[in-house]
Each structure stands twice: as C-alpha cells, then as structure tokens.
Image (spheres, rainbow, N blue to C red):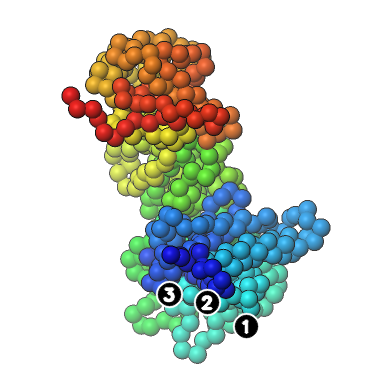
Amino acid sequence: MTTASEPAAGVDVTGRLWGVGVGPGDPELITLKAARLIRDADVIVYHGARHGRSIARSIAAAHLRGDQLEEALVYPVTTGATSHPGGYRGAIDEFYEDCAKRLATHLDAGRDVVVLSEGDPFFYGSFIHLHRRLADRYPTEVVPGVTSLSAGCAVLGRPLVEGNEVLTVLPGTLPPDVLAERIAGTDTAVVLKMGRTFPGVREAFTDAGRLGDTWYVERATTTGQRIARLDEVDPASVPYFSLAVLPSPVRGPRDPAPLRAGQAEWVTRPAAEGEAATATTIDDGPVAADHRPAGEVVVVGLGPGDAAWLTPQAATALATAEDLIGYGPYLDRVPVDPRQRRHPSGNTVEADRAEHALELAAAGARVAVVSSGDPGVFAMATAVVEAAAQERFAQVAVRVVPGLTAAQAVASRVGAPLGHDFCVLSLSDRLKPWEIIERRLRAAAAVDLVLALYNPASRTRREQLDRALTVIREHRGPDTPLVIGRDVGGPTETVTVTTLGAIDPAVVDMRSLLLVGSSTTRIVRQSPDGDLVYTPRRYPAP
C-alpha cells in the first residue's frame, strides 16, 4: 500500500504545488476549492515573521486536518534594514532560494504542497517568489482569493469602479510625488502596503487634491477592522495591512452618503493621551468623540511559556489589538509592535487591570488582556468578566480566547498523569481563607482524585505546602507518584518525577506546579530519557 507522500517504488511521481488564496481575513471568505485543497494537502506552507504567527494560517486553521506536515517560512527581515552583504534584496533572494529547496524536497517525495496566501496569490503575494523558482519544474496551479481591494470596498459600502472609470492600484512604497501624479490622473485608486509609509501616502492624496474623498480601511473583514477618513487617522496607529481607498465618485440619487447606511462595522480609534478628540462622520451625521461606538476586550491565553503553544486564535487577537494590558513579565512575552500601546502592571492588581481595559474599550479601543496559561484558570478572565458586570461597561463586548494550561503542559512532559479524573486547586490563600483550601484538599484527596496544585509556594508563603502535603498523606501512600514542573515551556524549565514520600518542598516555588497521583497512577521507568507517568483510564472494580 502506498500513500500520496510515499510513491510506489520505481515510480517517478512528483507532488503538485498549489498557491491558494485564503482571502483578506474572514475565514468564511475562503473559496470552496481552497478549503478542499487545504484539507487534502500533504504539506501546508505559510509565511510568518519572527514572532512565529501567521495570519494566513490562522485564516485557514479550521480546514487543517491536524496530521499534515507544516512548513513555516519565516522572513529573515521585514524592513529594508539588514546586515546581509547583498542588502535587503540579497537577503530576500537568499531566503526564497532556501524556501524553494525546502518545498522541492516535499514535491520530489510525491507530496502535494499548498502554499497559503493572504488575499490572492498573484496580487502582491509572496507566493510569486516561489512560483518563479518552482513552476517550471513541478505541476503548479494557482487558486485565486478575495483581494484586500474587494474586501475594503465591500466593508466601506462604496463601489471601487463603475462604468468607464479607470482604477489605479499603487503600493505605498512609491515616492510621494509619484503617488500624487498617479492619483491625480485616475478616477479611483487604492494604495496598499502602508504602515510606515502612511505619512507619504497622505501627503500624496493631499497634493493630488483628493484627500477629502479618500477613506482608510484597516484589516477589512476581520474582528480588528477599522474604518475612518484618511485625514483623521493617526500615522502611529497604521499597520501594514491597511488601505487608502479613493472610491468611485459616481453617486445615484438615493446614495448620497460616503458610507452605506447603518454601517455595522464602524470602528474608530480612541484619542491617545494628550491628543485632541475629533468628531467622525457617518450616515446619520457627525458623531462626537465621546459617543464613539464601544470597542472590545479580548482576554487572551498565552499558554505556559513556549511561543509554539500560542494558538492561531490567540495570535490573531494579539495582532489586531490596539492596546495590550497585562502583568509585566507576561506582556514581555508578546513581541513589540510600534502600532500598539502597552500597559504593564504588577502581579496583584487584577481588578485595576480589568477596569483599565474596559475603560479603554468603552472609548472605542480594541484591547487584549494577556494571561499566562488559560485566562479562565486562576487568571484574568474572572477579573474582567466581574468588572464588566458594572452598568458603565454594559456596551463593551468581552471575549475570552483560551490557552494551554500549566497543568496540561506539565502533564505532557511526563506522559499522561491526568488520564483519569483529576482536581485543580490553588494553594494560594491570598484571595480565600486557608481553611477553605484545606477542606477542599482533604475532600479531593479522600475520593482518590489526581491533584493539580497551582501556586504551591512563594518566598513568603512556605508553610502552606507543608500543611497541604500533610493532608494529602492522610489519604495517599509515600510511593504515590508526584511530578514537579517548574517554568515548563520557559527558558529555565525543569521537570522532576518523584514520590509523595520523597518530595523536597525546598525546590518548589511560585513558578512550580505539582501533580499528585491517585492510587492508580504509575511511574514507568525509562532511563536515561526520564520517567513516564500515567493514570489508567480503567478504574479497579470495588
């Protein structure tokens, strides 16, 4: 028997290369053909920056099988600054030569390769570089996708071109004087690739006398979508994935407004500190700055520490936020984006963080509150939801994006200690009396549940762990398996498999998590690679 990735012996069969457009951001805008090819592919390829996130992959995530090979093509440089002897062009050419070789290995092995492309693969797409190097050697096909131009005009509610009008598409990287000349000589125009080029783009529309008719569209069709007049946009807030749209000037008698009536996706940026508030015009007339539509708070789980454990959904929520809020060390795990405002704070001010996030969102901002692990497990989701119950935040949307928990991460390092029923408890008595903790701990130990113990000890809180171990030993023998996971997923990770009788409490701190086995949990000796621990799914008959 052979598979698509394992051709029959003696048969020279190469795989097929597909450039698949996944559209501008909304996963529902992926075509049926693109979805089928993504699902059936042997290898999924996507571009990303050094932070490890890929917008194209996050758009296509729902169609991935989970067992496919994945190739992340991480750009070596995303700006013109590089130490490569050939400069920016030399660095990019060398990068794509290497990428082509990586893909050729899969194609030579008979594997079908799908390269995910935001928007359309042949519309300013990175896939073009791979197509140029591989299409003459392997069967290659391109599946078109919805472009950012189409998405921008759709959410703006204005036609891009009509009748005999001429459309000009321009990259924002052109000099402002060239842009101005092209804009002045066309009917409608769209400028892409803005971000740092935005001041020059706005200058060009001004010089062409078209600024008052031009609109700004950011991340069209995504949850982070933003629409505003081009002359009202703060240059510091502009990401790469944004458009300047000069739509069709043709207006019918029943379409006098610059935007479609009842525009549901209208979002504006709140005034930054020290910045004068401005009014924004929509269909029903001017809207004062203090009556902007409310933004959103997304509580994002970063996972235990390893960047590879960040989910695509969490990556998207972080990438589309305007403000990031969190405990300082957790916020440091999110790559810096100059477009975003960051608000670090201490570890014991969860309620203040939550209210700050909601206040920013109430003013119209898209806010991400970061949490280690899963935000709903002893973390920030509770504080945000509790604060959101206040009447003054009634119009603010709140979402929670889950993350991998510390208990799951520690368990994965040693096998399957959580294979049967288990109980999660925090030993911190900062927010609840120790008497409650001890009563719950005794009850869980008595019914033979595996225990995942969060916040077991700190520099000033040592006796609680000793008292907890005493309670557990009333119901478990000294040979009960016990796992100590410290900074799992982080740079100082250690995982220790020991027993309830042999544990050294001195090695446990706030960065640790304990897994205490039940009566059925077993240790499988596997030296020198370490021990495996598991709890059988079958429970002994009474």
Q: Secondary structure at mark 1?
A: loop
Where residue 337 appears, x then y in whole percent?
58, 48
Inspect the image, locate mark 3, and give the three-letter code of the amino acid beneath it: Arg
Q: Is residue 129 above or below residue 237?
A: below
Residue picked out by circle 1:
185
Q: Is residue 115 above or below residue 534?
A: below
Q: Of the residues under marks 2 and 1, which one precedes in the sequence?
A: 2
Where residue 494 appears, x then y in whole percent?
54, 27
Inspect the image, locate mark 2, and give the three-letter code of the amino acid beneath it: Glu
Q: Of the residues under marks 1 and 3, which one precedes in the sequence?
A: 3
Report the Cα–Cα distance between label 1 and label 3: 20 Å
Report the Cα–Cα distance between label 3 and label 2: 32 Å
Question: Which residue does the image show at 50% across and 90% down from the upper left?
Answer: 164
Where residue 256 appears, x then y in whole percent?
39, 76
Of discs 2 and 1, which sits in the foreground?
2
Q: Which mark is residue 141?
A: 2
Residue picked out by circle 3:
158
Q: Decide: few, some or many residues near mark 1? Use Cα within 10 Å; few <14, some 14-19, many ≥20.
A: few
